[in-house]
Image (spheres, rainbow, N blue to C red):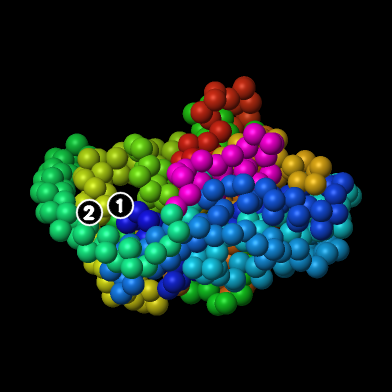
Amino acid sequence: MSPPDAQTYWISTKIHSDQFLLYCFEDPADSTAAMRRSLLARAALVPDLRLKVREVPFHADYPHWVPMDVGSDHVVAHEPLESWPDCLLAVGELLTERLDSRESPWRLHLFAVAHGSPRCGDAPAVVAVLQVAHALADGRGASTLARALFGGQDAAVRRAPSPAPWRPALALALAAARLPAQLAALLAAAVPAHRTHRDLERETAAGALPAQPPSLSKGPTNARPDERRSVRMVVRDAADLRGPGVTVTVGAMTAISLALTRYLRAQGSAVPADLAAEVTVAKPGQARSRNHFRNVAVDLYPGVADLRDRAAAIAASMATRRTRGEHPAAAAADRALRSVPGPLVRWGVEQFDFGAIPDTVTGNTVVSSVDRGPADLSLGGGPVRFTAGFPALSQFMGLTHGVHGIGDTVTIGVSTSPSVLADLDAYETMLHEAIDEVSAAFGSIGWRAAPSPDTLHSVSEAPAEQ
């Protein structure tokens, strides 16, 4: 396991970080039992779905990916649901579950919904929720796994040959043999990492590089959530959120900025003047781990009244944060991390207090955005109608947004706790209204022209911004 993925795995034993990828399929012809059998057979052909985690004895090295058989418990058919509100409740409850990657880093949940699912009219639907441990894949990788399950016969995932059978004694011996080389590599990597960090500081002081964004005061949405989870899905046409030079991600963040501002005011809460979102952004360069992204703080500009100006300001803030994140110092730090022996990384995770509540934050909400490709997926003969996702909450992040597109449809998935957003129905309505206003603002100057190929996605949760 790579150092970033191992760190992600160890953190997942402390806090919830599983991903939940939701796909809604309209009017499948097959029974739920038939779909389940088909999915189990399909999963057995996907290399990355036949892996689980094993720890090296005495935690002497990074964990290993070892072979795993796909079993009947990997696809769970839940009790049929009568309506879409029932499905929302069921998905909210699902978000409280946590995978143990030593048993399995994934599970697929099936919900048959009798009526009322978005984009399905009165037809029945099946909602499939793929639960994936973050150590196995980031947002883009998890979307690839889903495509392998629901795509055509040629859909496949190929990362690496299947690992050898697990031999703990051999893993321990290899860890001991690797340690001297790791320490030497760490010393060698420390020098350029320190040098490029000094370059970053000098360039920042000289104004040649954007400064690190300041920490923010906590707002109402940074309250600690309780154990309950509530979700909503705002399903829209992608055209409602984009325009020339404006990606779907930026359009969605503009709408979120507007809706969140209105919601806080309606609840009698002060709107932070420096309202910001923590956004997942793809790292440049070749991926050397399954998780190839970083988080950046993006200003949401609640005080900018003109929505076109607000969208431009949000896009500029995002570009500024990405410019700083692409400085050679970031790549040098990543190279240094790859040389750190596993026991040191694990020790660092163990020392961190994940229950502590900081005085300041980097954002008031989370926005994760992934393009999940063309709408050519199906399940049991039923075509996919939309997809959604729900970034995890944390001790100081009580509201998250997942912006996920498939084909010409984009869904903003909202995840929160009733202790943080008491009236989620009102917020859902405000988000729809905000998207209508964003669409009108973009369309009022002829922004309905066909978008360029890169207009749909470009940042995000692991990441490919829309």
User: In the image, what residue occupies the spot 46% across and 45% down?
Assistant: 161
Q: Amino acid at mark 2?
A: Ser
**Residue 324: percent from the left, percent from the top?**
28, 42
- Tell me if mark 2 has few (under 14), some (14-19) or many (20+) residues whose alpha carbon lies within 10 angstroms of its own: many
Disc marking residue 51: none
Amino acid carrying label 1: it is Pro
The residue located at (72%, 67%) in the rendering is 90
Outermost residue toward the right in this view: 122
Relative side of 72 to 203, left or right: right
Vertical arrangement, residue 103 with respect to residue 337, above or below: below
Q: What residue appears at the point 62 percent right and 42 percent down from the top-left corner?
A: 147
321, above or below 37, in the image:
above
Residue 213's label in the rendered image is 1
Crowding at mark 1 (Cα within 10 Å: few <14, some 14-19, many 20+)? some
N-terminal label among 2 and 1: 1
Q: Which residue is mark 2?
A: 339
Q: Can residue 380 be seen in this snapshot?
A: yes
Query: Which quadrant: the N terminus?
Result: bottom left
Q: Is residue 255 visible?
A: no
Q: Is residue 147 magenta?
A: yes
Q: Nearer the viewer, residue 360 or 105?
A: 105
Membership of 431 in magenta stretch: no
Left or right, residue 99 beside residue 121: left
**Residue shown at 81% from the left, 42% from the top:** 381
| Viewer-side label of 2, 1 | 2
Secondary structure under badge 1?
Answer: loop
The residue range painted magenta reads 141-163
* Quarter-of-image position of residue 64: bottom left
Judge whether 177 appears above or below 169 on screen.
above
Residue 336, horizontal then vertical, whole percent: 21, 51
